[in-house]
Image: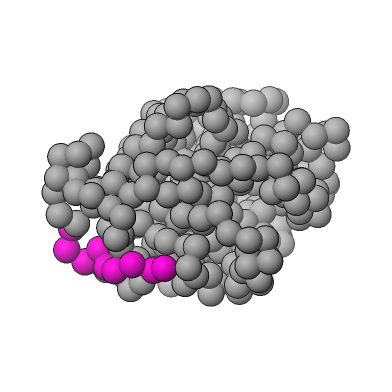
């Protein structure tokens, strides 16, 4: 297998990029593993390097960065035979944590040759791709505030927490209608996560039952609730047990549409966009990802407990077309 490594030197919390190049050289030089090592020079360059690697016949394109870097590289690989590899260098590393990829550069580089390709689903919002978690509401506002903060985008959990508290105190949710495969659902969400993977990153598992190759998105709706009840949920999110609460619901669907009526922020793997409406769909198993063998061998689960595509305040049909929920889509998690 031929590997191209693409390093985003600016990603993460400040770890020396040379550490990652040293780890790759140590694991791949002299081992009969053809590879090349490249660095990005700005936004969008990772996509260009990945496209070039595919054209040059490389079997694996390894992103060294955070979830934003992974998104940029992976977009060039969708629908191609090339597989995405991950050496985590971000502050959250959501997709890397999904597959228990080591966060230590040396351990991750040494493990990579044993990994096998797994075809995962790819989400799409307004024509743009995401691979882990997208969303709108409070999380998108926090991401936008982080991009605009005077800290210059200093990474780590603490800056996010500080901005999160500030944005929570400012944010006023408004009612929305979610149009999905099972019908339409009226909500007043604090946030809506469009989860292909389980977590945002840093261990914050917003969708602990999401499966990356089951052909469904877990649309996790956290309704507005008193602050003390939401605060109690934080340890459960990091423990991976955030499944049931009166203000929580999960909708499993392949498609989603929502009209905001005004310009609002949303995010794709943490990268902020804005729009007046969202059209969401899923590309089943459209990206190959190199994962530990135990993940590559595991089949997707056809049905999962604790969630559904319908609720008591839902009415039938995608775009009012009226079709029943698919078999195996479960029951409410509220």
Q: Nearer the viewer, residue 107 or 236?
A: 236
Question: Is residue 307 in the magenta section?
Answer: no
Residue drawn at point x = 53 percent, y = 74 percent: 241
Q: Is residue 313 left or right of residue 265?
A: left
Q: Nearer the viewer, residue 156 or 98?
A: 156
Provide residue 108's location: percent of width, then percent of height: 63, 60
Closest to the observer: 171 or 205? Answer: 171
Quadrant of the rendered image containing residue 55: top left
Image coordinates of residue 202 in percent, x first then y, are 67, 60
Magenta stretch: dominant SS?
loop
- Residue 330 belongs to magenta span: yes
Q: Does residue 119 appear left or right of residue 97 in this picture?
A: left
Q: How many marks?
A: 0
Q: Is residue 66 above or below residue 332?
A: above
Q: Which residues are magenta?
A: 326-334
Residue 101 in view in this figure: no
Q: Which quadrant is the C terminus positioned in?
A: bottom left
Any part of residue 240 in sight: yes
Left or right placement of residue 44 versus residue 219 in this view: right
- Please, is residue 185 above or below residue 308 in the view? above
Residue ID at (60%, 72%): 236
State the residue in front, 274 or 212.
274
Residue drawn at (53%, 60%), measured in percent from left and top? 206
The residue positioned 33% from the left and 49% from the top of the image is 185
């Amino acid at each position: 297998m031929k590997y191209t490594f693409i390093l985003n030197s600016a990603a993460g919390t400040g770890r020396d990029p040379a550490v990652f190049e040293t780890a790759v050289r140590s694991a791949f030089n002299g081992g009969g593993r053809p590879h090349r090592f490249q660095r990005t020079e700005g936004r969008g360059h990772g996509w260009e390097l990945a496209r070039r690697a595919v054209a040059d016949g490389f079997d694996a394109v390894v992103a060294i960065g955070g979830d934003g870097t992974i998104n940029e590289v992976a977009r060039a690989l969708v629908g191609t035979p090339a597989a995405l590899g991950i050496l985590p260098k971000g502050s959250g590393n959501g997709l890397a944590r999904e597959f228990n990829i080591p966060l230590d550069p040396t351990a991750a580089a040494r493990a990579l040759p044993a990994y096998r390709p797994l075809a995962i689903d790819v989400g799409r919002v307004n024509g743009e791709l995401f691979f882990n978690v997208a969303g709108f509401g409070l999380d998108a506002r926090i991401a936008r505030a982080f991009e605009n903060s005077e800290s210059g985008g200093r990474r780590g959990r603490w800056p996010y927490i500080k901005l999160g508290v500030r944005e929570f105190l400012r944010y006023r949710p408004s009612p929305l209608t979610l149009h999905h495969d099972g019908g339409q659902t009226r909500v007043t969400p604090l946030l809506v996560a469009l989860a292909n993977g389980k977590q945002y990153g840093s261990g914050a598992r917003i969708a602990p039952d999401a499966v990356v190759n089951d052909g469904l998105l877990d649309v996790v709706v956290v309704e507005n609730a008193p602050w003390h009840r939401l605060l109690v949920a934080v340890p459960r999110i990091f423990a991976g047990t955030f499944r049931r609460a009166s203000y929580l619901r999960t909708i499993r669907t392949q498609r989603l549409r929502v009209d905001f009526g005004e310009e609002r922020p949303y995010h794709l793997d943490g990268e902020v966009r804005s729009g007046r409406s969202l059209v969401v769909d899923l590309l089943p198993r459209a990206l190959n990802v190199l994962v530990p063998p135990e993940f590559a061998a595991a089949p997707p689960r056809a049905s999962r407990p604790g969630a559904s595509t319908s609720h008591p305040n839902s009415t039938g049909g995608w775009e009012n077309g009226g079709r029943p929920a698919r078999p195996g889509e479960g029951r409410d998690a509220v």
